Amino acid sequence: METEKKPVSNTEVAKKAILVGCNNYPYPITKLKGCHNDAYNMHNTLIKRFHFDPKRILVMVDTPGSKNMPTAANIIKQLEKMIEDADEGDRLFFYFSGHGMPLCDNGESKQAIVTCDRNLITCMDFRYCVSRLPEKATFTIMADSCFSGGLIDEEPVQVGLPYIVPHNETCGGENTPKMIPYESYMANLSSTTGLNDPDIGAHLIQLFGSEVSIMFQQSTGQNPLPIMKADQGILLSGGEPSEKTVDEPADKNGPAGGAFTKAIVAILKGHPAPITNKKLVIMARGILGNKKDNPQHPCLYCSSKNADAIFLRKASHGRAEIGETSEDRVLED
């Protein structure tokens, strides 16, 4: 069987990653248990499997006193820096494990991730990031959160069929859905801002000012729409745009963690040969979609060319990848 070998060259292709795990959401948002573990699982996978330099991986988890607290402002700041510093052919990776939420913008369904301070980073923010990539650089996003399908706005779907979630579908057992109901989120914002306004943007702007998503800034004329163009964005989502994902509790098989992240890590460990984005998502879809309780249907959003590209190993235009190894991080119980 062909195995993935670390290339050798005098010139390095930059591979950089930002890994985010949000567990400790403020009341009344449901706290999660496995998102920090998910981030560290991906950290270990990037180093051992894909030879990322640990110095080029930023882990952001919401532990008390964290130097890199995953607020929306901090995450956007790090994303912008990663993109601004990128060169032609570089490979960038953003991973998120935490709550997600559906939105509506001018009658269109949109998606967002919820950061530890209750602020939102929306599909339009990720579209803006992708649209600013240097030539031939790629930006892979992996989202283990509810409603994460479509998290790069307007990105074409390559794996994923329309899937309508039954209205009575809930998470079984001790699994926790990685979602915040829109009505509950709005009620919480209203109790904080004191505004009687159905516009979610009005509440977020009052709370976070210029740190709100570009989706809400454009409604006030602060920022233009992100540039739409052919891009190198790649999204692996834990489910369909209308689907819940789950945070599984610790059990005899291991510590708490997201079902999607566990599936991806297990596939990569059991599949040492290079694997395409499309095959990786199809395999994860096969594992999670057949579960009796809480089935999930991971999706892939990207160009058809990137669907057939090797996961995190796109052609490097003569610049090889050089990385280091690292000891495993200790996962939380």
Image (cartoon, rainbow, N blue to C red):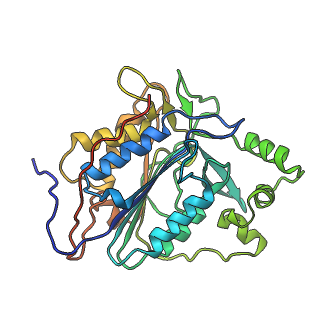
Using the image as rendered, state which of residue 110 and residue 186 is in the foreground: 186
Q: Is residue 270 shown above or below 229?
A: above
Q: Number of marks in the image?
A: 0
For residue 154, say whether it is visible. Answer: no
Residue furthest out toward the left: 1
Q: Residue at 17% of width from left, 74% of height from top? A: 10
Q: Position of residue 117 (x, y in %)?
A: 66, 49
Q: Is residue 214 left or right of residue 235?
A: right
Q: Residue at 49% of width from left, 70% of height from top? A: 81
Q: Residue at 49% of width from left, 40% of height from top? A: 35
Q: Which of the 4 quarters of the picture holds residue 257?
A: top left
For the C terminus, the quadrant is: top left
Q: Is residue 84 left or right of residue 120?
A: left
Q: Is residue 174 left or right of residue 10?
A: right
Using the image as rendered, state which of residue 42 and residue 179 is in the foreground: 42
For residue 306, say whether it is visible. Answer: yes
Using the image as rendered, state which of residue 53 and residue 267 is in the foreground: 53
Q: Position of residue 116 (x, y in %)?
A: 62, 47
Q: Which of the 4 quarters of the picture holds residue 157?
A: bottom left
Q: Position of residue 4 (x, y in %)?
A: 17, 54
Q: Which of the 4 quarters of the picture holds residue 301?
A: bottom left
Q: Position of residue 208 (x, y in %)?
A: 73, 59
Q: Residue at 78% of width from left, 71% of height from top? A: 220
